[in-house]
Amino acid sequence: MTTEDKTKGTAARVTILDVAKAAGVSKSSVSRFLDERLPKSDSDTARNVRRIAAELGYVRDMSAASLRRGKTGMIGVIVPRLTDTVMAMLYEALQKAAARKSLFAIVATTDDTPDAMRNAAETLLKRGVDGLVLSTARLDDRFTTDLTERDVPYVLALRTDGHSKSSIGDDELGGYLATRHLLDLGHRRIGLIGGPSYASSAAGRLAGYHKAMTEAGIPTADHLTIEAAFSMESGAVAARQLIDMAPDLTAIFAVNDNTAIGALSELQTIGKRVPEDISVVGYNDIPLTALLPTPLTTVHVPFEQIATEAIELLLDDESAGTAKCAMPTLIPRASTRRI
Amino acid sequence: MTTEDKTKGTAARVTILDVAKAAGVSKSSVSRFLDERLPKSDSDTARNVRRIAAELGYVRDMSAASLRRGKTGMIGVIVPRLTDTVMAMLYEALQKAAARKSLFAIVATTDDTPDAMRNAAETLLKRGVDGLVLSTARLDDRFTTDLTERDVPYVLALRTDGHSKSSIGDDELGGYLATRHLLDLGHRRIGLIGGPSYASSAAGRLAGYHKAMTEAGIPTADHLTIEAAFSMESGAVAARQLIDMAPDLTAIFAVNDNTAIGALSELQTIGKRVPEDISVVGYNDIPLTALLPTPLTTVHVPFEQIATEAIELLLDDESAGTAKCAMPTLIPRASTRRI
DNA sequence: TGCATTTTTGGGAACGTTCCCACAATCGTT
DNA sequence: AACGATTGTGGGAACGTTCCCAAAAATGCA
C-alpha cells in the first residue's frame, strides 16, 4: 500500500520474489510459508513473511501455481441447464461445498443431450478442472467409462448410473412418501407423471410410487403412469394425457416440481380445480412451490447435503463405487386434500 | 490413439514438445501453428503439425498458456443468485456470448449484498479472470471506482451505475410499455410494485410508469407505488400493502416477474381474482410466466442481446463509458384484461 | 561440550507455454 | 543474376510458482 509501483505505465505484479526480497528470505521460504495446504507454521519468520506479503498486496498467480502443482483447484459441474431452479440450487450448493474445501466450482450446461455433455466435459477438462460433478448421468450411457479410462476423477449427483461414485437423494423413498401421502388422504386413483426413463431419479420415484400403491393393495393394472421430460411444458401435456386416459383421477404425483407446475396450468385450463377436484404433489421443493397461487405439496430434497457429500466423494480416492443417499421429506401444502 | 503411453503408471501428458518431435519441427513452430489467435496458416507444414497434434491427442495446458500469455481466457460474472431465473438466464446467455469469443464465463453469487460482492469479485480475480461482468451494480456504490483504479476491465449488465460501461435493457421504455398497456385497457387506478431503489433497472421502470401515467393525464398524487425487493416473498407483502392503501385498484404493474408471482399469490389469498378483479403485469418474461395457471402478461427482455453486447463492450478498450440499451417488448397474456 | 538428530533454509531445476530475435528461405523486381 | 523485401523457422529466455535436495541451523541427549 505504501510503496509505489515503480514502472510508470502498467502496474507491475507483486511476485513471490518481491516478498522474498522485502522480507529478506528466499523465494522458497516465502512459497512454503504461504502454502495453504501445509499446516501453517507460526514461527516469527513465517508471521513476518505473511505480514509483508499482505502489506505488499501479494496474490498468488493461479496460473503459475497450477502449472507447477499440476492442479487448478477448480472442479467442473455439468448440469442440463441453470434456468431449471433445481439445477441452480444444486450448483449453488456445490459451489458452497467446494469453497469449503477451497475449491472453485465452474459450470457448463448441456440441455440434457448426450453429445452436448461430452462437449461440456471436454470444455471443462480443457480448462483444467481437477474433477467433474455430473448431474446428467444416464443409466445407459458409457461416457463415464471414458472418464475412468482417462483417469478423470468424477462423481454423479442427483442421478446415478448404478456403478459410479454418486451422491443422490433417496428417490424411491421420496416417491413412496409422496404417494403414501395421497393414499393417506383417501385417494386411490392416483396418476403419475414420470420423468425420462434414462434418469435414475425418475426411475426411483416411479419405483416408490409402485411400492406405495402395491402396498395399499391397488392392483398394478390400475397404476396410471405417463412419461414426461423434466419441463413445465411436458408436464402440461402429460397432465392432459393422464386426464384423457382416466377422467376419474383424484390425484396426480408429478416427479418434478416443474412438471407439476405445468400440470397445474393444464388442469386449470381443463377446468379442474386444485385441490377441490384433484390433488397434486410435486418433487424437489423449489422456492416457487411455496408461493404458487395454490402452494404445492412437494417432497423436499436436501441439496446442500447432497452437494457436500458429492464433493467429499470426489476428493476421496478410496471410495470407488460408493453411493451416498440423502433423505427426502414430504412438505404438505395446499395442493393436496382429503377426498 | 494408436500410440501407447510409455510410462506404466500415470498417463504422461502430451506436450507441444512431443508434437514438435513427431512432426520434425521446433516447439516454436508448433506453438505458432496451434495458436488460435493468429490467422491460421494453411501451409503443408502447418496442416501436418495440426494433424499430428490431433493424432497424439494434444491439448494445450491452459495453466502454462495463461502464465505465459498473462491472460486466462476466463471472465467472471457476478450475480445476486442463480436460483433467480432471470439471473440464470443472463448467465447462460453470457456464457454463450463468451464462448463465441472463445472465452469461458465463471460465476460467483452475492445475495445482492455489497460486501459479498467485494468477496465475489476478489475470488474471481484471484482465479485470474481477464474481466468482470457485474449485474449487481448499485447506483451509489463506489466499488466500480476501485476496479478502475486497479485496472480491472469490467462491464455492468442489466443494471447501470450511470457512468461505467454497461449493457442494459431500456427499463424506462419497458415500464412505459407495461403501464401504457394497462392504460390502453382502460385502467386508471394502477399500482406499482417497484424494486429496490439502488437498482437502476427498478428506477428506470418506475420512471417509465410515471411517464405513461402523467402522459395519460393522471395526476402524480394518484400514482400508487411501493418499494419491494426482487423476490416473490416481498412481492406478496407489497401487493397486500398496495391493496390496503387503495382497495379500488384495478391493476398492478410489478417491475419483476418474481414480485408479480408473489403478488398473484397474495391476491389469490385476499380473494381477488386475476384478471377479473385486477390485472397484473410483470417484467422479464421468465419461462414460468407463460405456464402459470393464469399466464402472466409481462415485458420481454432480450437477454441474449444484452449478454452479447456486454461481452463486446468488455473486450473493447475504446468504449469507456458507453452504455448499450436493448429494446424490451410487451407480451400480453391472460393476467390483464379490459376494464 | 560434543555428536547425532531433527528442523529450517535457500539454490536451482522443473512445469508447458509463448514470444523475442536472429537467421534461413522464398519471392519479386530490376 | 543480384538485390532488398517478405515470409518462415528454431533457439533460448521468459512467465511465477513449487519442489527436490543439499547445506545450515537448531535441538536433544549423553
Image (tube, coloured by chain):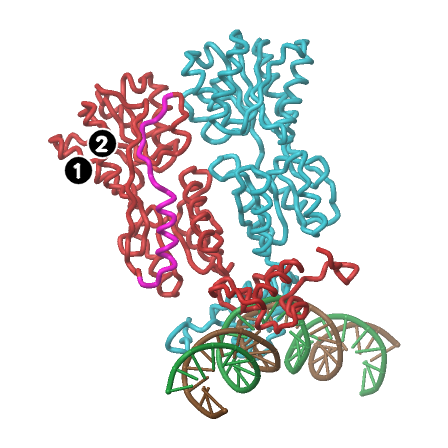
Chain colours: A cyan, B red, C green, D brown
Q: What chain letter is assigned to the residue under label 1?
A: B
Q: What chain letter is assigned to the residue under label 2?
A: B
Check the image and report above or below for A143 versus A253. Answer: below
Q: Position of residue B272 (x, y in %)?
A: 31, 18
Q: Position of residue A156 (x, y in %)?
A: 64, 40
Check the image and report above or below for A149 versus B128. Answer: above
Quadrant assignment, res A256:
top right
Residue linked to disc 2: B179
Q: Can the viewer see residue A305?
A: no
Q: Earlier in the sequence, mark 1 or mark 2?
A: 2
In this view, the residue in front, A74 or B305, is B305
- Magenta stretch in the rendered image: B294-318
Mark 2 burial class by Cα count in 10 Å: few <14, some 14-19, many 20+: many
Q: Position of residue A233 (x, y in %)?
A: 47, 26
In this view, the residue in front, A177 or A80, is A80
Q: Can the viewer see residue A82?
A: yes
The span from disc 1 to disc 2 (Cα, nearest Å) is 9 Å
Q: Is residue B50 left or right of residue A263?
A: right
Image quadrant containing the N terminus of chain A:
bottom left
Residue linked to disc 1: B211
Q: Is residue B109 left or right of residue A32?
A: left
Q: Are marks 1 and 2 in contact (CB under 8 Å)?
A: yes
SS assignment at label 1: helix
In this view, the residue in front, A148 or B112, is A148
Is-magenta flag for residue B238?
no
SS assignment at label 2: helix
Check the image and report above or below for A268 versus A168. Answer: above
